[in-house]
Amino acid sequence: MDPLLSERNASLNYQPYATTLVGAIEPCMTNRNLLHPTTPKRLSINVADDQLKRRIGSKTVLNAAFDELVRWCDAAVHTGWKMEVVNQGGGDFRFYKYLKKARPELAENIPFVSFHSHEEVFEYYKTVTVAASSRGHGMMILFGVQCATISLIMHEKVASFISD
């Protein structure tokens, strides 16, 4: 075995949660869209609303972070990605409301996706090309279904998951 691969494997620490192992336990739940992307490629973004002000700080800092995410959404749409804002936690509306107010013409082309069951969450994430999330369980689900992931680190839980 390659020494670098051995070293990397020795340093991996898997979280002891079933959500991080979904793709290994049920291969039919594995995301294959990074290697075989759909046309257009789909990029989802989830910004956790719970305790967002406490995690981010002042409204000025929050607005600056949201402005950056709006620019990111705009760039993705203009380079051919299909963007979707995801309500994964049941109340993750704040960023989408900000997007609709800041750039209504952009928001018209970005659907807001909500789920009614855990099964819908897993089914959805196995079909997107890349997903960005600031939610701890959002990251764990993405990891579990082997979806390409962008971490929006806004608090310690996501930062510690990524550092493992």
Image: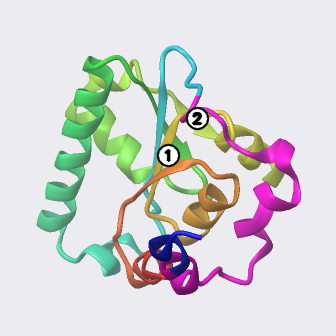
Does residue 100 appear in the picture of this structure? yes
**Residue at x 77% of width, y 55% of height:** 23
Q: Label 2 near label 1: C-beta < 8 Å?
A: yes
Q: Does 20 lie within the magenta span?
A: yes
Q: Which residues are drawn in magenta? A: 7-35
**Other residues around mark 2 within 10 Å, as few (<14) / some (14–19) / many (≥20):** many
Q: Position of residue 95 (x, y in %)?
A: 36, 49
Mark 1 vs mark 2, CA separation in Å: 7 Å
Q: Position of residue 24 (x, y in %)?
A: 80, 60
Q: How is the image coloured?
A: rainbow
Q: Position of residue 110 (x, y in %)?
A: 43, 26
Relative height, residue 90 to residue 1 (above, below): above
Name the residue tied to disc 1.
131
Left or right, 163 with reference to 65: right
Q: Mark 2: which amino acid?
A: Val
Q: Mark 1: which amino acid?
A: Ala
The mark found on residue 128 in the picture is 2
- 148 or 120, which lies in front? 148
- 26 or 95, which lies in front? 26
**Residue at x 27% of width, y 74% of height:** 56
